[in-house]
Amino acid sequence: MAMLLLGYAFIFIARVIDVTLSTLRTLMVVRGKKIHAAVIGFFEVIVYIVALNKVVGQLSNPMNLFAYALGFSTGNYIGIYVEEKLAIGLTTVQIITQNSELCQLLRQKGFGVTVMEGMGKEGSREVLMVSLPRKSVPQVMEIIKQHDESAFVTIMDTKGTRGGYFTQTRKAK
């Protein structure tokens, strides 16, 4: 009985690792990080084949399939969680606001801000564009929340940039 439980645990854990790596590899591909994606893919496929072999080798045991499927779903969850914590890459935050001080507040915190004039249903607005490392998004969102609850905010993945000012280049204060 202990060997069966160890077998199920092995399949589950291997699948969690495999799918977590798959999620991270996919995100590296989308962000154009070829070397990272290739290295992750190497280990991902090894774990995948080992787990699959364990299941296919014993198809008569439905619990193997259950452990495999449970590992897959758990791996998706953990992969997304890990990726959110790593927050790799850049993002662009677009803020539509009537608060003309918000731009200066963001700049005082070291963020590069481009301002454009916009026209909304209820009149003129400022459109602030802030490109920043994804790890800095919570800080920017907190500034917006504190100073303009009614701002309309969109957050977009940024695949690449050239030039400009980024918070990673600012000096610590």
Image: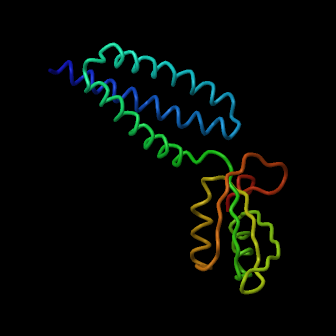
Left or right: 14 in relation to 96: left
Left or right: 49 in relation to 139: left
Q: For the N terminus, which image quadrant?
A: top left
Left or right: 17 in relation to 136: left
Left or right: 152 in relation to 60: right
Give the number of callouts.
0
Determine whether 72 is above or below 117 in the image. Answer: above
Q: Position of residue 146 (x, y in %)?
A: 57, 77
Determine whether 77 is above or below 70 in the image. Answer: below
Q: Residue at x 39, y 26 (%)?
A: 14
Q: Position of residue 169 (x, y in %)?
A: 75, 53
Kindly indicate the quadrant of the structure image that contains residue 76: top left
Of 59 and 100, the residue lying toward us: 59
Q: Residue at x 24, y 22 (%)?
A: 6
Farthest residue, direction top:
57
Q: For the C terminus, which image quadrant?
A: bottom right
Q: Position of residue 165 (x, y in %)?
A: 79, 57
Q: Residue at x 32, y 24 (%)?
A: 10
Determine whether 68 is above or below 131 in the image. Answer: above
Q: Residue at x 51, y 48 (%)?
A: 85
Farthest residue, direction right:
163
Farthest residue, direction left:
1
Q: Position of residue 172 (x, y in %)?
A: 68, 58
- Looking at the picture, the colour scheme in use is rainbow
Determine whether 140 is above or below 29 in the image. Answer: below
